[in-house]
Image (cartoon, rainbow, N blue to C red):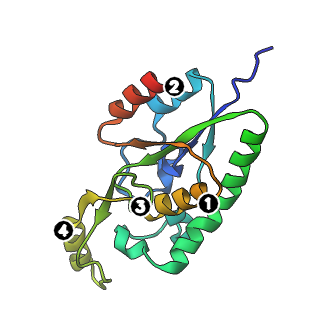
Amino acid sequence: MATRAKKIILLSHCILNVNSKVEGKDPVPGAQSDILNLLIEKGYGLIQLPCPEMSYFGISRWAHVRDQFDFPIFRKHCRKIFKPILMQVQDYLNNGYEVDGIIFVEGSPCCGLNKVTKGENWKGVNDTESYAQLLAESTKVEGEGIFVQEVKKLLAKNNLELNLYVLNEKQPELLLEELTKKL
């Protein structure tokens, strides 16, 4: 009988389930298999974080930029959906497990760790031509996503320090290299 490794890592929802993303934004057909395979080989249990965008707006939502999520009720929603995960993390730690960290997704308006999607003129539109123009004008800028900010606040409030990693979906090999060296 194998012994548990007692190692856990948390993942942004779309790393395990790309279907939660806005349609048309899929970098892979279903899951980030190379990263998942590495974590499984290293003996990690995986906790999938809830997707704040999907749980608030549903699967049929439009694409958004960070500024559109920066309002009090959405921030409250982010805290609410992370609190059950936080309690699991505390329980694992209290029982001798290692919770190594969280892997976020670069460029996401909610889960971006170093870069987020931004759009200066995103105030709402009512025609597809204007929406297409807004999409074309959106850019990636330095900053943290709304969910990342709220998760970090809750971790700090509970005196928890976890490693924070980021998946750049256009260059997943960067995260693979980092995880291979660190884990």
Q: Is residue 39 above or below residue 92?
A: above
Indicate the position of residue 106 as horizontal and vertical percent values. Answer: 36, 50
Q: Inspect this view and state whether residue 158 appears.
A: yes
Q: Which residue is mark 3?
A: 145
The structure residue drawn at horizontal position 40% and vertical position 59%, both measured from the top left corner, is 23
Residue projecting furthest to the bottom: 126
Amino acid type assigned to the residue bearing label 4 in the image = Glu
Amino acid type assigned to the residue bearing label 1 in the image = Lys
Question: Nearest the camera: 57 or 173?
Answer: 173
Q: Earlier in the sequence, mark 2 or mark 1?
A: 1
Q: Earlier in the sequence, mark 4 or mark 1?
A: 4
| Circle nearer the viewer, 3 or 1 | 1
Q: Are marks 4 and 1 in contact (CB under 8 Å)?
A: no
Q: Are marks 4 and 3 in contact (CB under 8 Å)?
A: no
C-alpha distance separating marks 4 and 1:
37 Å
Q: Is residue 87 above or below residue 80?
A: above
Indicate the position of residue 33 as horizontal and vertical percent values. Answer: 47, 32
Question: Nearest the camera: 54 or 128?
Answer: 54
Q: Which residue is mark 4?
A: 137
Q: Which residue is mark 2?
A: 183
C-alpha distance separating marks 3 and 1:
18 Å
Indicate the position of residue 44 as horizontal and vertical percent values. Answer: 62, 29
